[in-house]
Amino acid sequence: MISGPCAPQMRIVLMGDHVTALPEESLRACPVDFVVTGGDFDLGLLTICEHLRTGSPLEPGIWWRDGDALRDSGPFTARRRDHGQRVLVDRELTKWWLYGEHLFYKPCTYTMVGRDCWRPRCPFCSWTTLWPRFGTRTPESLLDEIELVTDNLATASGGGR
């Protein structure tokens, strides 16, 4: 754990293609607390937060420091949750107005209906490791999100930012 006057108990987490391929090397080379392997980095980070808050076990694909030893929770597997059951992004928290296509129209925001690659056979691509199976949300889930966005964000004070 890194500490200092501004963040006395800050935890540092690495995630991405390189640490997925070489998590042990990454922990040895960087003074970080955790490494999340696999492609569902948001869910891996969530399991670390739940572990730190409640002591719940870490799900597969997480590496961490235990004193001088390096530990892992087992090999990454396609994560646990159906894409249709994922929590929607808190668009205010993530400042949604900063990520639109401002050259074309305002307001604008994104949704994510599918996660993974629909052609997971390319031997040169890291996605075959990160996203081993294609998963999508239900049409109903997407329509619920669109309704939420149009009802709440387009007319909100942030809509014209």
Image: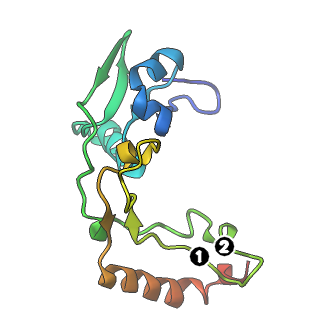
Mark 2 vs mark 1, CA separation in Å: 5 Å
Looking at the rendered structure, the kind of residue marked 1 is Thr
Residue pictured at 36% horizontal, 25% vertical? 64
Name the one closer to the observer, 33 or 140.
140
Q: Is residue 15 visible?
A: no
Q: Which residue is mark 2?
A: 100
Q: Quadrant of residue 3?
A: top right
Residue pictured at 25% horizontal, 43% vertical? 77
Looking at the rendered structure, the kind of residue marked 2 is Gly
Residue pictured at 52% horizontal, 16% vertical? 29
Q: Is residue 2 visible?
A: yes
Q: Is residue 9 left or right of residue 161?
A: left
Total labels drawn: 2
Q: Position of residue 10 (x, y in %)?
A: 52, 32
Quadrant (top left/top right/bottom left/bottom right) for the C terminus = bottom right
**Mark 2 nearby-residue class (10 Å; few <14, some 14–19, many ≥20):** some
Name the one closer to the observer, 88 or 100.
100
Vertically, is 125 above or below 85?
Answer: above
Q: Which residue is mark 1?
A: 109
What kind of element bears circle 2? loop
Q: Position of residue 146 (x, y in %)?
A: 46, 85
Residue pictured at 57% horizontal, 83% vertical? 153
Name the one closer to the observer, 127 or 30.
127
Mark toward the start of the polypeptide (2 vs 1): 2
Q: Are marks 2 and 1 in contact (CB under 8 Å)?
A: yes
Q: Which mark is residue 132?
A: none
Q: Is residue 90 left or right of residue 140?
A: right
